[in-house]
């Protein structure tokens, strides 16, 4: 029977995840400005194209190289509508690493609950739900967006 050995000496932790329209960094203070947080996308028809979504997540307790992936998945069908992956190298386990990922032109085929799901080395380390709602055109102004 084989033994699985982790290539990373520490289990990376995600201490926050935010779904929003955009994130800016103030060059003077180096602080991040989060714009337009939301939990719901309202649309009058499906499929719908959402032009831009930013996911901001904060990582800590990391040391080594991690294979990160961020995906958007429909809960009911299990369909992955977008996925971005790449390596993250961290040397200081006490550091807090803020990462923002912009996802453009997301195509939602169905309404319902979706998850922004963050994985490190194939293991889920954080999830954030949001909803896509089909509404009548006069109701569209009543969204969380």
Image (cartoon, grey):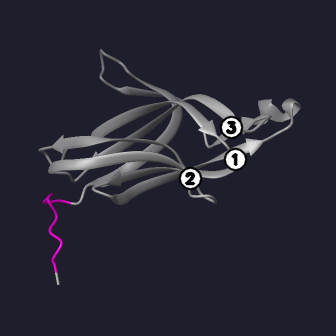
Which residue appears at 17% of the width and 42% of the height?
Answer: 89
Residue 46 shown left or right of residue 54 in the figure: right
According to the picture, the residue beneath numbered tag 1 turns out to be 110
Disc 1 crowd, CA 10 A, few/some/many (<14, 14-19, 20+):
some
Q: Is 38 part of what is drawn in magenta?
A: no
Residue 75 shown left or right of residue 98 in the figure: right
Please tell me in which quadrant of the rendered image residue 3 appears: bottom left
Disc 3 crowd, CA 10 A, few/some/many (<14, 14-19, 20+):
few
Q: Tell me the quarter of the image containing the C terminus.
A: top right
Q: Which mark is residue 79?
A: 2
Disc number lying in front (3 or 2):
2
Q: Is residue 121 above or below residue 41?
A: below
- Mark 2–mark 1 Cα distance, whole angstroms, equals 10 Å
Which residue appears at 16% of the width and 79% of the height?
Answer: 2
Q: Is residue 119 above or below residue 38?
A: below
Disc 2 crowd, CA 10 A, few/some/many (<14, 14-19, 20+):
few
Residue 134 shown left or right of residue 33 in the figure: right
According to the picture, the residue beneath numbered tag 3 turns out to be 144
Q: Nearer the viewer, residue 55 or 86?
A: 86
- Mark 1–mark 3 Cα distance, whole angstroms, equals 18 Å
Q: Which of 134 and 49 is in front in this view?
A: 49
Percent position of residue 126, x then y: 41, 55
Q: Is 4 part of what is drawn in magenta?
A: yes
Task: Please report the bounds of the magenta region as a residue range.
Answer: 2-10
Residue 136 visible to the viewer? yes
**Secondary structure mostly seen in the magenta stretch:** loop
Callout 3–callout 2 Cβ contact below 8 Å: no
Percent position of residue 137, x then y: 85, 31
Residue at far front of view: 1
Q: Is mark 3 on a helix, strand or loop?
A: loop
Residue at far bottom of view: 1
- Mark 3–mark 2 Cα distance, whole angstroms, equals 24 Å
């Amino acid at each position: 029977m084989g033994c699985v050995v982790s290539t990373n000496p520490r289990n990376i932790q995600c201490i926050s995840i935010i779904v929003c329209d955009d994130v800016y960094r103030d060059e003077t203070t180096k602080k991040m400005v989060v714009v337009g947080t939301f939990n719901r996308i309202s649309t009058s028809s499906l499929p719908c194209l959402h032009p831009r979504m930013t996911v901001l997540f904060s990582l800590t307790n990391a040391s080594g190289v991690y294979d990160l992936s961020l995906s958007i998945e429909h809960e009911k069908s299990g369909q992955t509508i977008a996925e971005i992956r790449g390596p993250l190298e961290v040397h200081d386990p006490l550091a807090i690493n803020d990462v923002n990922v912009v996802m453009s032109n997301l195509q939602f085929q169905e309404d319902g609950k979706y998850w922004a799901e963050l994985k490190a080395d194939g293991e889920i380390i954080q999830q954030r739900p949001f909803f896509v709602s089909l509404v009548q055109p006069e109701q569209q102004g009543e969204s969380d967006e």
